Amino acid sequence: MKPNSRVVQLASVDLQPRELANIKAVLDSGWLTQGSVTRQFEALFAERHGASHGIATTSCTSSLHLILDCLGIKPGDEVIVPSFSWIATANVVVQTGAIPVLVDVDQNSYAISPDAVEQAMSAKTKAVIAVHPFGFCADIDRIQEVIGSNIPIIEDAACAAGSQYKGKSAGTLGVAAAFSFHPRKSITTGEGGIILTDNQAIAQMAKMKRNHGAEISAEDRHGSVAPYLLPDFPVLGYNYRMTDIQAALGLSQLERFESLLSGRRQIAERYLNALSGRDELSFQPVDGHSWQSFVTVLDPSSKLSRNGVMEYLYERCISTRPGYHAIHMLSYYRDRFGYKPKDCPVAERLCEQSIALPLHTLLSESDVDYVLENFVEALKQ
Ligand SMILES: *Cc1c(COP(=O)(O)O)cnc(C)c1O
């Protein structure tokens, strides 16, 4: 580390005093778990994305698991999943007992390839999970076309709060969608997630299953004429409830959502303006992108070492990361399902050649200049 040099984080949490005041109000209220603040947060997030129902949970991972469970995905079923994603997208399928069929992604958008989905379809295919990588939406129309209208698409919209596809919001493109509020995402609740859906039956089932399978929520029971009576539990459930403490944070983040999104977009645009002419780099398309991450991919023919570039930046206190992993190359998936190198060559190349540059709303203009200056320098090494 150079003395007196600045430190540029990959991501950081943009909090304001208002957020802390809202959290304190929940703590003072005495009702800490899922209650009225969670309900407000769900309603506002669903409304912003044009979805009929929002069901807040503990994470995007638990949201995805809940959606698969509500759809009745079971052992013996197959669910098609892009290999280039966070491991959770595949893990949730394994958790239902079904088989995750990992397929390759499109080399321009980094999202699941409709052609690869078509080839992976079988009589056992029960759903497709489409990831919107880094906030750019997968080509949902083409995927639905190749799988037919009877197979549901689930959106892994972990990174896609505020993203758009052909004039529609992420979260309204498939049968149901799961978003993440981990601190690496565009808005945060510490940990947390939400399901968006227009499907009344899925919404109702997801609400029961996130609360141990209870027919009514604790909040509704406490407000009822006989709050001392326990509810019935007609289905098997989990504890996937968001707390009102988290929801208070989420609600205040949501109030600033448009400015947080435009702050991210401005930084992404500055990166693109400075870098898009370079032959050795490629980028995702920008239409509808919400810029959870800014990812660039080094052309393998450039002979640049991706890890060398990352190390060069690390030594100058600039934090970067690879985009995602290629899930089929992770040892659990190789050992259990027999995946081999070259099974999803694009995912492998993106995993090896991608770099996420710092992107968050606490970056100053001079931080962005500092990143650009050093990144361009690193490309000369
Ligand atoms: C972050 C992420 C997840 C996991 O989200 P959690 O809220 O941490 O469970 C899942 N899928 C993708 C594509 C992600 O980027």
Image: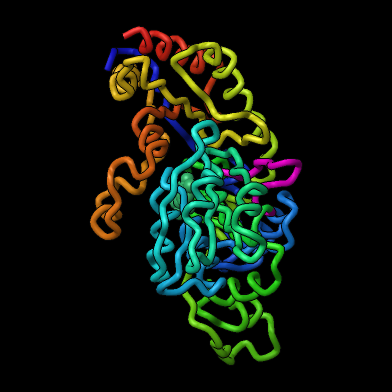
Which residue is found at the position 71% from the left and 50% from the top?
49
Nearest the viewer among 315 and 245 is 315
So how many labels did they put on this image?
Answer: 0
Q: Position of residue 248 (x, y in %)?
A: 60, 54
Seen in the picture, residue 16 relative to 178 is either above or below; the reply is: above
Q: Which quadrant of the figure has residue 323? A: top left
User: How are the colours assigned in the image?
Assistant: rainbow
Q: Position of residue 136 (x, y in %)?
A: 59, 38
Seen in the picture, residue 4 relative to 199 is either above or below; the reply is: above
Which of the image's four quarters has the N terminus? top left
Which residue is found at the position 59% from the left and 14% from the top?
273
Q: In this orientation, does residue 240 appear?
A: no
Nearest the viewer among 353 and 376 is 353
Q: Is-magenta flag for residue 38?
A: no
Q: In this orientation, does residue 161 appear?
A: yes
Q: Position of residue 56 (x, y in %)?
A: 58, 62
Seen in the picture, residue 251 relative to 98 is either above or below; the reply is: above
Which residue is found at the position 71% from the left and 59% from the top?
43
Q: Is-magenta flag for residue 166?
A: yes
Which residue is found at the position 43% from the left and 63% from the top?
93
Q: Which quadrant of the figure has residue 266? A: top right
Nearest the viewer among 139 and 135 is 139
Q: Position of residue 98 (x, y in %)?
A: 41, 68
Which of the image's four quarters has the C terminus? top left
Magenta region's main secondary structure?
A: loop
Magenta segment range?
Answer: 159-172
